[in-house]
Amino acid sequence: MKKSIITLVVAVFSLSFITTSCSRKITRVATDTTIDISGRWNDTDSRLAAEELSEEILTGNWITDFVQQNGKKPVMIVGLVRNKSHEHIESETFIKDIEKALIKRQKARIVQGGKMREEIRAERGDQQNNSSVSTMKKFGLETGADYMLQGNINSIVDAHKKEKVVYYQIDLELTHMQTNEKVWIGDKKIKKFVKN
């Protein structure tokens, strides 16, 4: 009897130790909190780079020249930002951060691009057959972009034993759609030291 009570106590203690030592704690934090666990590209890098580069784009001379010559805000489309880095980076998140920052400043108009534009065009096509004439949206009335923003994300890794330096460079270029002239080039550099 005494032996079985001791066995039961040991089993309960072991079980409670296992469940507490294997438990995971999750804490919700503000989305703008900087948390860098792995040393890789993360949401903070994406957001800060997008905000800084958007600020640079919208304070460039090209925008003042365009407004003076045309009397209106320029129309921009954000094209591809290619990931040429050593790791998986979801460039669509970065592109959305750029678009959000540009729209927030209201100095340029942003038009839809890529797959979302194709989805809108497909819906417009469907409306031609299935919507009333008074509510259907017509083809050929989209706002054309004056400028396209494109770029690359590159990286360099220097590692030795338990230390490494990860360097990211985001290069963006703004090109006039009619003339193919580059009117703005900018970059953002991020360097991280990781010690294991």
Image: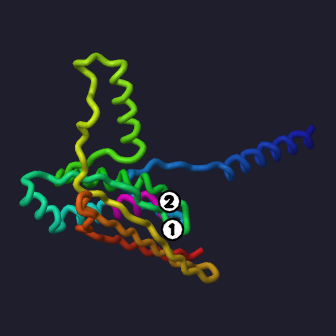
Residue 124 in the image: above or below residue 145: above
139, 8: nearer the viewer: 139
Q: Secondary structure at mark 1?
A: loop
Identify the residue shown where x is 41% and y is 72%: 169
Please give the range of residues in magenta: 41-50
Q: Which residue is mark 1?
A: 85
Q: Position of residue 70 (x, y in %)?
A: 9, 55
Pointers 1 and 2 in contact (CB under 8 A)?
Answer: yes
- The Cα–Cα distance between marks 1 and 2, rounded to whole angstroms, is 8 Å
Above or below 159: residue 107: above
Name the image quarter holding residue 185.
bottom left
Residue at point 21%, 51% (across, down): 75
Q: Please state which of residues 47 and 186 is positioned toward the viewer in this rendering.
A: 186
The front one of 20 and 28 is: 28
Q: Which residue is mark 2?
A: 89
Magenta stretch: includes residue 58: no
Q: Residue 96 in the image: state x and y as whole percent.
A: 36, 51
The majority secondary structure of the magenta stretch comes to: helix
